[in-house]
Image: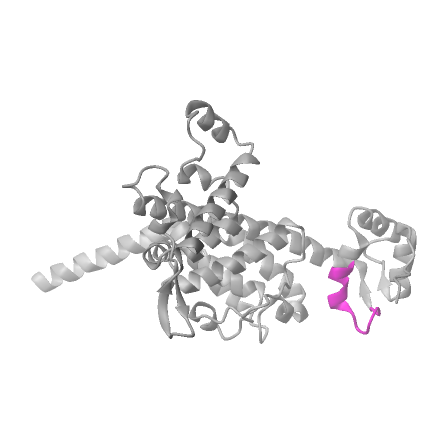
């Protein structure tokens, strides 16, 4: 079967929508034409699809598509910024704990991957945990150095150039500089391959009790980050694998493959990364949209129309209120102490 859809002008695209039941009362056809001239029709159709009553059949205002598009763009921006904070904190801890482990070797000690990588594996044939053969470890060390060189060579940050101008005899950069150059993908791989002691310290620093859970969460965050970076549709994005860990499953009304499940992970990590983060904008954005469009809440990832769950998850308490509560508790303890002493 050959693809035979013909090119359509913006006007023809509007007429196609109109023929499928889309109405242009709140937004005129002329205004709609201008809007889709700045949004690829194929991308825009991704927002339309959720409102279908039958395949390619609608009974809806064009403005509903725009409302969803605008919500998704704002939502994506906030989530991207939050993941960026997590990524920076994670990479900082990764560089710190690997450097701590290899400090006796020197500032380039991380290049000796035997010091911080876990080269053990479970041999199904023998039923024993074994160490990889020396030639396999050597190959991994060389591959690691090759990847570092590639990242360094294609980076244009001034700190890299300054470093090699100052240290002309060096061929590699310290890990605390490298961490600013490598991407989220390579840093998560380094975490995955590191020894348990390092993983434990990093997961603890990011408020995730189990290091294997953190590895699982980081891969999901990396995926979401890539979706947003490439302007994908985020609000109803579904993960391939369930986030069926206690952190998420404690909320019965959350779809564990949804973007809301990822949001739960971010919020938990933020307890250590940015405990004073103000969720007001995100909370109001979500609530205001789904109060008007409750029929889409389950596609977002919340079951049983439990919009209250968002209020609970994204509860923001001002610093002033927290201080006052501490003062009040302290005052009560003092008063109680006086009463008992007397």
- Chosen colour scheme: one colour
Q: Is residue 110 above or below residue 236?
A: above
Could you say which is closer to the camera, residue 127 or residue 278? Answer: 127
- Residue 317 location, x and y as percent? 42, 55
Q: Is residue 70 left or right of residue 93?
A: right
Residue at the image position 33 percent from the left and 49 percent from the top: 115
Q: Is residue 243 left or right of residue 76?
A: left
Image coordinates of residue 143 in percent, x first then y, are: 49, 48
Query: Which of these two is toward me, 227 or 1?
Result: 1
Specify whether residue 64 is in view.
Answer: no
In the image, is residue 107 above or below residue 38? Answer: above
Q: Is residue 66 magenta?
A: no
Residue at the left extreme? 342
Q: Quadrant of the N terminus?
A: bottom right
Residue 303 visible in this rendered orientation of the protein: yes
Q: Position of residue 255 (x, y in %)?
A: 56, 71
> Count of labels shown?
0
| Magenta residues (range) | 45-58
Horizontal side of 321 relative to 17 (left or right) equals left
Is residue 76 found left or right of 219 in the rendered image?
Answer: right
The residue at the point 77 percent across, 62 percent down is: 48
Residue 57 on the magenta segment: yes
Write down the quadrant of residue 58 in the picture. bottom right
């Amino acid at each position: 079967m050959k693809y035979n859809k013909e090119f359509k002008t913006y006007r023809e695209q509007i007429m196609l929508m109109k023929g499928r039941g889309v109405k242009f009362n709140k937004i005129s056809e002329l205004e709609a034409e201008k809007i889709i001239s700045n949004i690829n029709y194929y991308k825009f159709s991704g927002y339309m699809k959720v409102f279908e009553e039958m395949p390619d059949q609608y009974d809806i205002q064009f403005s509903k598509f725009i409302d969803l598009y605008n919500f998704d763009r704002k939502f994506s921006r906030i989530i991207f910024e939050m993941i960026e904070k997590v990524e920076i904190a994670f990479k900082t801890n990764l560089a710190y704990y690997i450097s701590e482990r290899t400090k006796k070797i020197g500032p380039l000690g991380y290049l000796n991957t035997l010091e911080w990588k876990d080269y053990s594996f479970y041999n199904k044939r023998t039923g024993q945990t074994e160490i990889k053969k020396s030639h396999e470890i050597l190959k991994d060390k060389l591959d690691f150095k090759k990847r570092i060189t590639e990242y360094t060579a294609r980076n244009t940050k001034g700190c890299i150039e300054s470093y090699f101008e100052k240290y002309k005899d060096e061929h590699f950069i310290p890990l605390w500089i490298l961490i600013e150059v490598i991407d989220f993908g390579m840093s998560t791989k380094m975490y995955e391959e590191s020894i348990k002691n390092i993983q434990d310290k990093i997961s603890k620093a990011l408020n995730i009790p189990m290091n294997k859970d953190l590895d699982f969460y980081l891969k999901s965050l990396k995926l979401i980050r890539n979706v947003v970076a490439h302007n994908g549709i985020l609000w109803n994005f579904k993960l391939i694998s369930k986030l069926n860990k206690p952190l998420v499953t404690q909320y019965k009304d959350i779809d564990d493959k949804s973007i809301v499940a990822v949001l739960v992970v971010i919020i938990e990590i933020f307890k250590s990364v940015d405990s004073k983060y103000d969720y007001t904008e995100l909370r109001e954005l979500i609530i205001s949209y789904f109060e008007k469009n409750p029929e889409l809440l389950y596609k977002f990832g919340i079951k049983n129309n439990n919009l209250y769950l968002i209020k609970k998850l994204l509860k923001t308490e001002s610093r002033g209120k927290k201080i006052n509560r501490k003062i009040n508790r302290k005052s009560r303890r003092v008063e109680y102490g006086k009463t008992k002493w007397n």
